[in-house]
Image (spheres, helix red, strand yellow):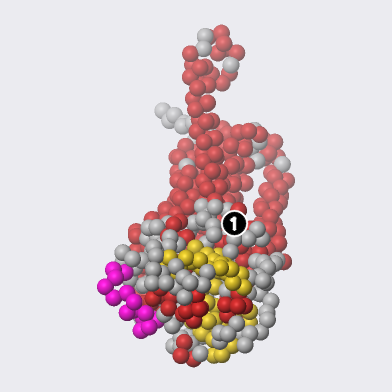
């Protein structure tokens, strides 16, 4: 005897009679709700469009001297003003790359002072102008490689850090230079505890004195925009970008190696040296290649970001896998 | 759709493809959450409008998941091959691409999670029609579609493990998914308790309660 199997469809799946009779209206309603879902997406993103990230306004022109010796990028073209001023990691002004351009707009950098302390003769609070007034601002075109595996070529305007250090007369005890970013109420990002504030970075004295290392005060011949670390920031082209501490308002010469912020945050992922090294991967991603902003195809990452000739000797004998 | 237009307008950021990849990923997760919200909502409101709506939301999740996956393949794998043996679209290049993806899925835990989350949505998308419910039988179909729970959890872990330092956003989605799954567990527990109680109830009581006829 053929026993008919009970319906496989649960009774709850059967369209209720009332709904079936009004199915056309239901389809219309469902369509409208679906349309509303798309609409919500368009509106929220549309709001973002109306507020599309604007590149930095052009600033005060600086008197800069091109330095071709330090501007060799093997023909790699410079990134644009727009790219350099709208794609920034500056968590004090938001953790998204397009936030600093918006939120750092009104950051005040006039009457900037830098507090110098530690193992040196010249201690105290110095107005920025005093520190750089008799220095020549050079144009240096450097690669900048972020630890996140993207990079840019940036025409910085800056002063060799060595010149500034010499002015401050560090003592023999000074083995490291420690620098901090200003902590300001105008920075909305500091309410988040994503990082410990203020942002701290450091260099070994020989790294700081290397001819490549500069304090940048400008970009493309103009005063450094806020989102790029105005009014003065560190640039160490053979290291990952997070070593480039921005908006420096404190310098300390120390005997012991400073604990830099990213190492403090995730010591298994970010170290003190942070030398660009395609052979030492980040625990979660490879460092063998990078995306040059503006390009589609990735590039092979260069050892020491291509500056090995000038800096490899600083690290002979150092295990770069352990000291990342 | 908006994203494509915005990319054309140059509005997306200095690295538009990575913005596109990130946004499609987040939207996939959002639609997964909306999909998970609907059955608890039905139980709360007793309305059955949600069934086809749930399918639509699930397919949106799959749609964004697919866009996210394709963008990742193109941007993070294809663009990074460095050398394209035989040409940009040669068989050798495609094999190299496949090997690159496999390598990533195996070696990078957060990619493993993302891959699991996406792959599990494929059978769900394929069997999303009522035809398939009939073909499989409601019970088997429902069992298969519980894979969305695995997708939701894998998706949250994928997001959590890929962010550099700020876990606040993945944390939020983790909380949402946790609540949506907890509601289901709670409902199941309550349902079980109810039927157990009814089974042991005296006959006079069960006569009044038609649902215990299931007994």
In depth, the one of B76 and B2 nearer the eye is: B76
Residue placed most toward the observer, B163 or A183: A183
Q: Residue B60 at what x, y percent from top left? A: 57, 54
Q: Does the magenta stretch include residue A309?
A: yes
Q: Horizontal and vertical percent for residue B49?
A: 65, 41
Residue that appears at 50% across and 33% down: B185
**Is A28 in the magenta?**
no
Tally the marks: 1
Residue B78 appearing in the image: no
The percent coordinates of residue A197 (x first, y second) are 54, 57
In the rendered structure, which segment of residues is drawn in magenta?
Answer: A306-320
Residue at image position (69%, 76%) is A57
Q: In this view, does A190 lie to the left or right of B107?
A: right
Q: Quadrant of residue A221?
A: bottom right
Residue A239 found in image quarter: bottom left
Q: Quadrant of the N terminus of chain A?
A: top left
The answer to whether residue A76 is visible is yes
At 39% from the left and 63% from the top, the residue drawn is A256
**Label 1 CA crowd tier, 10 Å (few <14, some 14–19, many 20+):** some
Looking at the image, residue A98 lies above or below residue A36 = below
Query: Does residue A89 appear to the left or right of A119 in the view shown?
Result: right
Q: Can you name the residue that lies furthest to the front here?
A: A121
Look at the picture and state if B192 lies above or below B178.
above
Magenta span dominant secondary structure = helix
Task: Read off the chain for label 1.
Answer: A
In terms of secondary structure, where does tag 1 sit? Answer: helix
Q: Name the residue under label 1.
A: A190
Q: Residue at x 36, y 66 (%)?
A: A324
Q: Work out whether B62 lies above or below B140.
A: below
* Along the viewing direction, whichever of A11 and A6 lies nearer the viewer: A11
């Amino acid at each position: 005897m053929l026993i008919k199997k009970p319906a496989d469809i649960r009774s709850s799946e059967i369209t209720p009679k009332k709904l079936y009779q009004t199915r056309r209206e239901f389809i219309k309603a469902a369509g409208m709700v679906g349309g509303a879902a798309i609409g919500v997406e368009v509106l929220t993103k549309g709001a973002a469009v109306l507020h599309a990230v604007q590149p930095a306004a052009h600033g005060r022109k600086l008197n800069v001297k091109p330095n071709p010796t330090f501007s060799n990028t093997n023909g790699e073209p410079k990134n644009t003003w727009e790219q350099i001023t709208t794609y920034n990691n500056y968590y004090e002004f938001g953790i998204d790359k397009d936030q600093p351009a918006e939120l750092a707009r009104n950051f005040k950098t006039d009457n900037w002072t830098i507090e110098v302390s530690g193992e040196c003769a010249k201690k105290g609070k110095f107005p920025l102008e005093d520190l750089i007034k008799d220095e020549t601002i050079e144009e240096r075109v450097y690669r900048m490689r972020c630890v996140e595996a993207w990079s840019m070529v940036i025409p910085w305007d800056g002063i060799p850090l060595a010149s500034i250090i010499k002015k401050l007369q560090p003592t023999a005890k000074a083995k490291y230079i420690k620098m901090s970013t200003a902590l300001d109420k105008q920075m909305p990002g500091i309410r988040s505890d994503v990082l410990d504030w203020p942002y701290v970075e450091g260099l070994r004295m020989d790294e700081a004195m290397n001819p490549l290392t500069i304090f940048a005060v400008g970009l493309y011949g103009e005063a450094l925009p806020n989102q790029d670390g105005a009014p003065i920031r560190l640039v160490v082209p053979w290291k990952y970008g997070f070593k480039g501490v921005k908006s420096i308002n404190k310098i300390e010469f120390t005997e012991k190696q400073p604990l830099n912020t990213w190492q403090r945050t995730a010591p298994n992922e970010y170290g003190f040296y942070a030398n660009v090294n395609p052979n030492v991967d980040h625990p979660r991603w490879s460092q063998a290649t990078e995306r040059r902003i503006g390009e589609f195809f990735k590039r092979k990452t260069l050892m020491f970001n291509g500056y090995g000739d000038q800096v490899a000797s600083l690290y002979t004998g150092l295990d770069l896998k352990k000291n990342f | 759709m908006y994203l494509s237009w915005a990319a054309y307008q140059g509005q997306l950021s200095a690295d538009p493809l990575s913005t596109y990849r990130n946004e499609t990923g987040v939207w996939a997760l959002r639609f997964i959450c909306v999909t998970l919200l609907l059955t608890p909502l039905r139980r709360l409101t007793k309305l059955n409008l949600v069934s086809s709506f749930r399918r639509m939301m699930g397919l949106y999740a799959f749609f964004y998941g697919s866009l996210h996956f394709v963008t990742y393949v193109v941007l993070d794998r294809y663009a990074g091959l460095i050398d394209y043996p035989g040409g940009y679209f040669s068989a050798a290049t495609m094999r190299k691409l496949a090997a690159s993806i496999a390598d990533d899925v195996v070696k990078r835990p957060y990619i493993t999670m993302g891959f699991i989350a996406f792959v599990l949505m494929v059978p769900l998308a394929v069997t999303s029609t009522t035809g398939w419910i009939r073909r499989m039988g409601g019970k088997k179909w429902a069992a298969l579609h519980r894979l969305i729970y695995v997708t939701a959890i894998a998706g949250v872990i994928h997001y959590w493990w890929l962010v550099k330092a700020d876990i606040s956003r993945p944390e939020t989605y983790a909380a949402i998914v946790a609540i949506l799954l907890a509601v289901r567990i709670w409902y199941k527990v309550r349902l079980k308790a109810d039927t157990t109680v009814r089974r042991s109830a005296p006959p006079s009581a069960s006569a009044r309660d038609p649902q215990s006829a299931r007994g």
